[in-house]
Amino acid sequence: MHRLALIAAAFLSIAGCATLGYYGHAIGGHYAILGRADPIDDLIERPSTDPALKRKLERVVAIRDFASRELGLPDNGSYRRYADLERPYAVWNVVAAPELSLKPKESCFAMVGCVAYRGFFNREDAEREAGRLRAEGYDVLVGGVSAYSTLGWFDDPLLNTMLNRPEPELAGLIFHELAHQRVYARNDTAFNESFATAVEREGVRRWLAHRGATDEYEGFLERSRRQEQFVALAMKYRGPFDALYRSDADDTRKRAGKRELFDALRRDYTALKRQWNGYDGYDRWVENLNNASLISVGLYNEHIPAFEVLLAKHAGDMPAFYRAVEKLAHEPKELRESALKALQPAVSVGRGASNRS
C-alpha cells in the first residue's frame, strides 16, 4: 500500500468527524505536490529547462550534497526532486492564542503529536479557519510558509516557493527542513523549531566558508544581525505580557495593560528601524501585532542560544551534537526545558537568533 494511504488510514482511524475534513485537505494537498515533482537531475539535463532555473537547481544539488556530507543531515531523496506549485507559498500556517494568554492553541495529530499551529495548502481555507477562531475570541496570525517537513515519512521535494531568496537563505531553509528529519520531539514546537534554526545558522556559516563566499557571508551576517535585533525586541516583551496575563488583575485592566505593552513595543520597533537604513521587512508583523504574533517569534527562536551552546560544548561535532539533542528529545518535556534553560546563562546578553521565515 502507498505510504500516503497508510497514513490516511492511521489518521482516519483516530479522527472524529470534525477533523476528517482537515486530514483530507492535508493528505490531498501533499499528494498534489508530490505529483508535480520531477527529478532535479533530469531537469538539469533537459534542454527545455529555463537556464536561470537550471543554474539554481545545480546550486541546490551542491547544497543538498553538502548537507549530508558535511552536516550529517539525512542522505535520502528529500530535495532531490523539484515541483513548481505556481503559488507564492507552500502552505499558510494559522497560529492562535487566547485574548489574554501566550499559550498557543495546539492541534494534535497521530504521527507528529501536538503543534502550535495548523497548516493549510489553500490560503482561503487558512483565512476561513482564522475567521472562525477570531469569532471565538482568539488572537490569530496567518502566515505564508515556503517549505514544510514530513519528518522523513516522504521524500520532500524542492519547491519554487523556496527559490526566490538569496542563496544563503535557500541553503539555510534546506538545512532547517532536513534537521526536522534528523531529530524531532513530539508535542514541543519550540524545541523542534529552535533546534532546526540552530542547525540552519551553523550550516549556512559552514556552507559559505566552504565556498569562500566572503561577500555573501557579510550580507548574510547583516541580515542575521537585523533578525537578531528584531527577535530580541519581541522576546523582551514576552515576560511582561506573560506576567500581566497571569496577574490577579481583572480582564478590563489586563486588556488596558495589553494595549499599553503593544504600544510600547511599536515605539521600540520604530526606534530600532532607524538603524536599518530603511529596511521595513518586519512592518507587516508589527501592523498585525497580537498574542499570536509574539508566539510565532518564540516558536523559532526561544531555545536557539541553548542549542548553540550545546553545539559549542561538542566542539562543533555535528553527529555528537545530534546525539545530545536526541537524548533531550526523549526526555519528558519538563526535564528537557530545564536542561535547555540551564544552558542559557552561558550566552552573552543581547544575543538573539534568526528566523527561517
Image (cartoon, grey):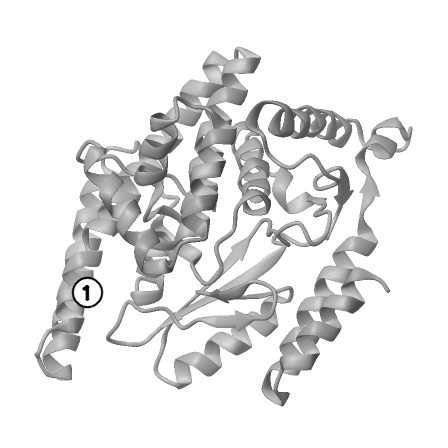
Furthest residue in direction bottom, as rendered: 17
- Position of 55 with respect to 89 (left or right) is right
Mark yes or no: residue 195 visible.
yes
Residue 323 coordinates in the image, percent (x, y): 48, 37
Furthest residue in direction right, as rendered: 47
For label 1, the SS is: helix
In terms of image quadrants, where is residue 92? bottom right
Which of these two is toward me, 257 or 70? 70
Up the image or down, 288 lies above or below 135; here it is above
Q: Which three-letter amino acid code belongs to the residue tagged 1?
A: Asp
Residue 20 coordinates in the image, percent (x, y): 66, 82
Residue 119 coordinates in the image, percent (x, y): 56, 65
Up the image or down, 122 lies above or below 39; here it is below
- Position of 237 with respect to 85 (left or right) is left
Up the image or down, 20 lies above or below 240; here it is below
Mark yes or no: residue 278 visible.
no
Instruction: Name the quarter where the N terminus is drawn.
Output: bottom right
* Residue at horizontal 70 percent and vertical 29 percent from the top: 56
Up the image or down, 145 lies above or below 109; here it is above
Which of these two is toward me, 205 or 328? 328
Q: Determine crowd level at label 1: few under 14, some 14-19, many 20+ residues with C-alpha closer than 10 A.
A: some
To which residue does mark 1 refer?
242
- Position of 109 with respect to 21 (left or right) is left
